[in-house]
Image (spheres, helix red, strand yellow):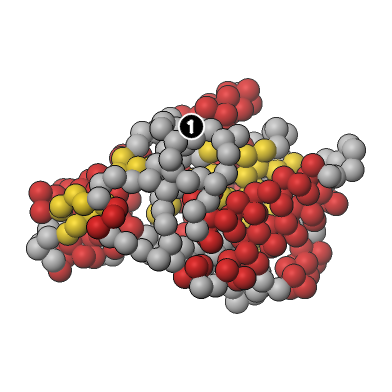
Amino acid sequence: MNILIFGKDGQLGKAFQVLLDSLIPTLAEKPHVQYVGRAECNLSDAAQLNFHLNQFHPQLIINASAYTAVDKAEIEPELAFAVNATAPELMAQYAVQHGATFLHYSTDYVFDGEKYGFYLEDDMRNPLGVYGKSKAAGEEAITKAFATSPSGSAGQYAIFRTSWVYGDGGNFIRTILRLAKDRDELKVIEDQYGVPTSAQWLAQVSLGLAMDAKGQLRAFPSGIYHAVPAGETSWYGLACWAVQAALDAGVSLKTPPHAIKPIPAVEYPLPAPRPMNSRMSTDKLRKVLEGQGNMSKLELLNQPWDGAVRSYVHHLAKDGSI
């Protein structure tokens, strides 16, 4: 089997490299994996993208790439839509034409955040900024490509909506810990809610839906799935937890948790609006994993966010990355 992964330079792309490097030696039939990053392919160039697809002939396409500069997207809408909407549409069209499996990753930013409680997959999209609009357009383009596929097509897709991703790269947790080393006090938004999601966790859960323990592709119902760990928190709650985890790991910080001050989002204006509520129900994904008898990935889905963040921070401390 050929696996083509776009976005090798990002947090999720790097997580897939680590995951597959550890997984492939255990498989009887070892897949051929090709990783594509910015240096190899400009995703805003349709010709380059189609070249990689047609050259490698993947049975599994994983799109871990995205334009994620939320504020910059407000002044670069064409580029955001090219990477987040047009490129995924071309990947989906290839998957339909060649009967391939397509995994794509989306975001809580497709919602306006005004719902009370947890969002469901079929809740109405209402993105607030260009980034969210471009990701919503990508979801719609993928869904349309498969909906208009010829009868009997073997292609299948999963769009994983997730939130607050952290991993090997720049992210909120690393920023907070860096600032906590230099400042006596931090101010962090307390009225925006979501679920921190490890890129490593997301790679494991999503690949587990599509591939079995032997390395063979699984059949699953095509559609959108929410993929986040259990629980919820605010940016303020995450900051306090990460700082305490670093202190517990022996890291010297100037800002203890009690010196982190909660503030409302209106006191920290940004160019692009953010959803106030990013909580998403994972019941749909849970039911499909149960139907597959996929208990190891179901256990991952049920893991709370806080333990994963603590492990991540301790790993950063051990590596001297804080």
State whether residue 203 appears in this view.
no
The amino acid sitting under disc 1 is Ser
In the image shown, does 40 or 178 lie closer to the viewer? 178
Q: Residue at x 44, y 36 (%)?
A: 115
Q: Is residue 42 left or right of residue 270?
A: right
Q: Quadrant of residue 168?
A: bottom left
In the image shown, does 293 or 243 lie closer to the viewer? 243
Outermost residue, right side: 151
The x and y percentages for residue 173 are 30, 56
Q: Quadrant of residue 179?
A: bottom left
Other residues around mark 1 within 10 Å, as few (<14) / some (14–19) / many (≥20): some
Q: Residue at x 65, y 49 (%)?
A: 139
For the residue labelled by badge 1, is the local secondary structure a helix, a strand or a loop? loop
Which residue bears the numbered disc 1? 281
The x and y percentages for residue 89 are 72, 56
Q: Quadrant of the C terminus?
A: bottom left
Q: Is residue 202 left or right of residue 60?
A: left
The x and y percentages for residue 57 are 80, 59
The x and y percentages for residue 40 are 64, 74
In the image shown, does 296 or 275 lie closer to the viewer? 275
Q: Residue at x 25, y 50 (%)?
A: 264
Q: Is residue 239 left or right of residue 86?
A: left
Q: Residue at x 57, y 29 (%)?
A: 284
